[in-house]
Image: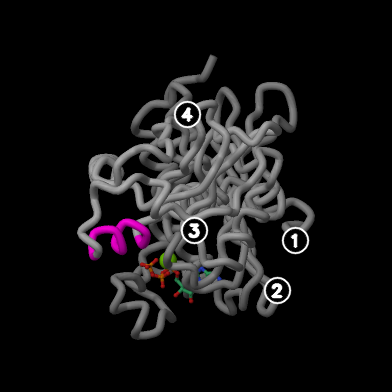
Amino acid sequence: MTMDSEVTNKLGPDILSYSVEKVMVRNIPQVTPYWQMRHIKELMRIRRLDGVPVTDDEGHLLGIISISDLIICIENKDLEAPVSKYMTTPVKCLILSKTLIEALREMNRFKYGRLPVVDEEFKVIGVVYWWSLFAFLQEALDTSMVVKKTIPSEGVISYTYQVLGRDFVHAGNASLQMRKSLQQLSIDPKDLRRTGIIAYEAEMNIIIHADKGFLQVKINSEKIEVTAEDKGPGISDVSLAMQEGFTTAPDYIREMGFGAGMGLPNIKRNSDIFQIDSRVGVGTKVYSVVNLIRRLK
Ligand SMILES: Nc1ncnc2c1ncn2[C@@H]1O[C@H](COP(=O)(O)OP(=O)(O)OP(=O)(O)O)[C@@H](O)[C@H]1O
Ligand SMILES: [Mg+2]
């Protein structure tokens, strides 16, 4: 089994070394020190911002007004006061060339919920909010299942997705991503449905019964091949495992709605060619072919 050499996780150092530009919120209104705090309160409420940078008339960063500054102002019943009275200064900021990991470190170290981003002239071009960073990382996590897209030979496209044992949070994501990739091709819905079932059941078997593995789909003009390969305990009696209703899933898995012992029979039923190869203590490989009703051009 060769999976280690094939699998790399997209949510690795690569993503964290992106520029903060990826996550920064632009179009933040330019707030100057002469604004009244009353207007800041409205701005924060309408735009649902918990902090805004304060600049001079040319856009150079001077300070920041955060929700805690606003609270103090409200407690003082001082909403007519200028921003300059309540803004925090000097302010920590990021220059555009900083990376996401640096932004994360800064925010964590100082417990800041937001950091203005400035250019070389110290002009504000956006703000990184914890939620904008979080949303980006969440999105990256969800798509980190797409491990590799390759074109191994002419007319063949191949996608590989990583699957981790016991990862119920992302359960179903790999087969969902696979389905989305296939939907972009003009595959007959019946074939798409069969492939979806095969991929989902194979993915769930890795999640429930194995440690880690991958799901791969290869498409050419005539057929779709799905391979699910894992490192795990393997199956000691494959013909028993193939019987409808046979399961070794523990109670807590059954309570989650899995473990009917129908996965492997279902994969076989939906495949034109089905092969299973398993070695105890090593892992399992399930290979399926779906012949396309309609040839792809
Ligand atoms: N990748 C795997 N690694 C180790 N054992 C497996 C693997 N896939 C299946 N098995 C074994 O084969 C049995 C039958 O698998 P099958 O997919 O048919 O049913 P299930 O996973 O138990 O339940 P269901 O798929 O209906 O949720 C499993 O209970 C497990 O013992
Ligand atoms: Mg199963």
Are the two marked residues, 3 and 4, in contact with CB atoms closer than 8 angstroms?
Answer: no
The answer to if 71 sits in the magenta stretch is yes
Are the two marked residues, 2 and 4, in contact with CB atoms closer than 8 angstroms?
Answer: no
Report the residue marked by disc 3: 203
Q: Which residues are magenta?
A: 68-75
Q: For the residue with label 2, is its CB less than 8 Å from the closest atom of ligand 1?
A: no
Sequence order check, earlier mark of 3 and 4: 3
Query: Element type at marker 1?
Result: loop
Residue type of the residue flagged with mark 3? Glu
Q: Report, in whole angstroms, how far the alpha carbon at label 3 lies from the one at label 1.
A: 17 Å
Pick the quarter of the image with the C terminus: top right
Residue positioned 34% across, 47% down in the render: 49
Residue positioned 55% across, 71% down in the render: 238
Report the residue marked by disc 4: 292
Are the two marked residues, 2 and 1, in contact with CB atoms closer than 8 angstroms?
Answer: yes
Residue positioned 34% across, 33% down in the render: 190
198 left or right of 164 in image: left
| Residue 39 point in image, percent of width and height | 26, 40
Report the residue marked by disc 2: 282
Report the residue marked by disc 1: 1
The picture quadrant where one finds residue 262 is bottom left
Residue positioned 61% across, 78% down in the render: 233
Label 2 or label 3, whichever lies nearer to me, is 3
Query: Element type at marker 3?
Result: helix
As drawn, 153 above or below 206? above
Callout 2 environment at 10 Å: few (<14), some (14 to 19), or many (20+)? few
Sequence order check, earlier mark of 2 and 4: 2
